Image (spheres, helix red, strand yellow):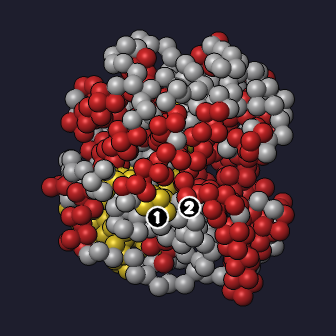
Amino acid sequence: MSFLRVNMTTETVQWEDIPEEYSLLGGRALTSIMINNEMSATVAPLGVENKLIFAPGYFTGTPLINTGRLSVGAKSPLTGGIKESNVGGTVAYSLARLGIKAVIIEGKAVGDKYFLLNIEAKNTASLVSADNLKGMRTYALAKKLHEEYGEKKSITCIGPAGDFQLHSASIQSTDLDGRPCRAAGRGGLGAVMGAKGLKAIIVDRQGKIPSEITDAVGFQKAARAYAKDVQNDEFSGQVLPEFGTAVLVEPINAAGAFPTNNARFGQFKGIGKISGETMARVIKERGGKTQHKGCSQCIIDCSNEFVTEKGEYVTSSLEYETIWAMGGMIGNDNLDAIARLDFLCDDIGIDTMNTGAALAVAFDAGYREFGDADAAISLVEEVAAGTEMGRLIGNGPNAVGKHFNHSRVPTVKGQGMAAYDPRAIQGMAVTYATTAMGADHTAGWVVDKNLEAFGGTVDAMEATGQVEISRNAQIHMAAVDSAGICDFAQSGLATEAGINNVFTMMAAKSGQVFGREEWTELGRRVIKAELEFNRKAGFTKDDDRLPPMFYNEPLPPHNVVVKVSDEQMDSTFDFLRNTP
């Protein structure tokens, strides 16, 4: 495999052998460790010295199912720290099958130049002028590029939000149907791509370079066992194909952990209108698809296609986090409006979660009324238009809060929190506060350990045990993101036999001994690099805190606040770092 290093300043592409220190890394491990090694932590996120790295997971391109994950890494303009944003679709698999371990974007295009990066085959790539594409929305862009370059192409691109270099800008990737509906949404990395003058990367989907596996027979045996476990699991084999991640809407609301009206409440009165069960029923009645394959190598098919009453395509896939962000968080119980907002965010190239939180702060400040779906749609359209208010929304909740002098801003390190209120699920308070990524739920999802409905073993509204649970989850997820395994296929590694299959595959691919100790060390190494980068960027333990609203405002219906102390927060990774 090779690195493809692209210098936007000199307009050159260069193929490189992979240094030994990176040979056994993939995904998040590769992006985070490389960024920490190769970059000064004090560079301007939208400046010439920032790097933007696209890295398929370590298993991507192998026969293992559900490993079509792409890690995108850079210094974030939203948080000011290191960022890895993870996305599915087809791009990661396409890169891996061309023998590309990572695409590294450096420099910055001179003047107002804009480019496409066209990767056609092994050792064949070029920068193509794209000045005429600046400002184009992602769906029209993908259609145009497929018409010009052929249908058998994967595309990762930015929309107007990235062109404007807004801090919530996403990087959109195409699914198996060629639609740019998969988002590397968090951290504003679309703004970094726009600042570099790169509108899109086009990757040929017909690569046939086999993955480098030392013991192919051993790998195949473990991979088949893993796939069987995923298929036989009730959640990944039956529930997700039927309802997708939207199945979480009802149980999280029932637990009083569904942030509503800018996290003033933990339950949403209109939940029945936007639940996963309601969504599935509406899709079926209208002739859409509740089960849809969106990503390479997927056997779960948790995606869906939401359609209008006339059966016209609206968006794919309508997921839990977006249903919350564009639903309960802004008091909106109109499922069609939520779907429209999801499409607009993908089309404009902006994170649904950070944008929903930004809208919620604006509504909370009195700019519009909670529940006004038309106002939400209008404001998101303003992002594409580049109006003053649109740019505020596009720059995220902190920008909106500052503009309105409004203190109720649910962010950590500048990034909006996810759809699990940390007062009702105290373990999420630890994850939101201590991950280097900002308030990122995927960094350490501990809902299953907290809520009885998911088999939880601790009191969700108490601090006891939460630090250890979050710490372990974060270390584990750093390794999962590095391997390139889809979060929803973790049912394959949920048992001792399942995780041993992963260890077997790691050893079979690398040719080196690999077990639980090596898995944990991989996760620790990734987190250590991320925390080290942030420390060098100026972060201190004071940045590992939630906003005052979560400590001071009891959350209905349980009327509880965050109980995890500052000292407990600081102990999460005290063995990995030296914070002032």
Does 469 appear above or below 389?
below
489 displayed left or right of 468: left
Q: Position of residue 442 (x, y in %)?
A: 61, 46
The residue under label 1 is which amino acid type?
His
400 displayed left or right of 484: left
Q: Label 2: state its secondary structure.
A: helix
The residue under label 2 is which amino acid type?
Pro
| Callout 2–callout 1 Cβ contact below 8 Å | no
Rounded to the nearest whole Å, what is the CA distance between mark 2 and mark 1? 8 Å
Q: Residue furthest left?
A: 132
| CA neighbours of label 1 inside 10 A, class few (<14), some (14 to 19), many (20+) | many
Q: Residue at x 63, y 45 (%)?
A: 443
Q: Residue at x 62, y 13 (%)?
A: 553
Q: Front-most of 539 and 236?
A: 236
Q: Which residue is mark 2?
A: 241
Q: Residue at x 78, y 39 (%)?
A: 452
Does 500 appear above or below 140?
below
Q: Report which quarter residue 156 is drawn in.
A: bottom left
566 displayed left or right of 147: right
Does 482 appear above or below 547?
below
For residue 292, the mark is 1
Does 373 appear above or below 299?
above
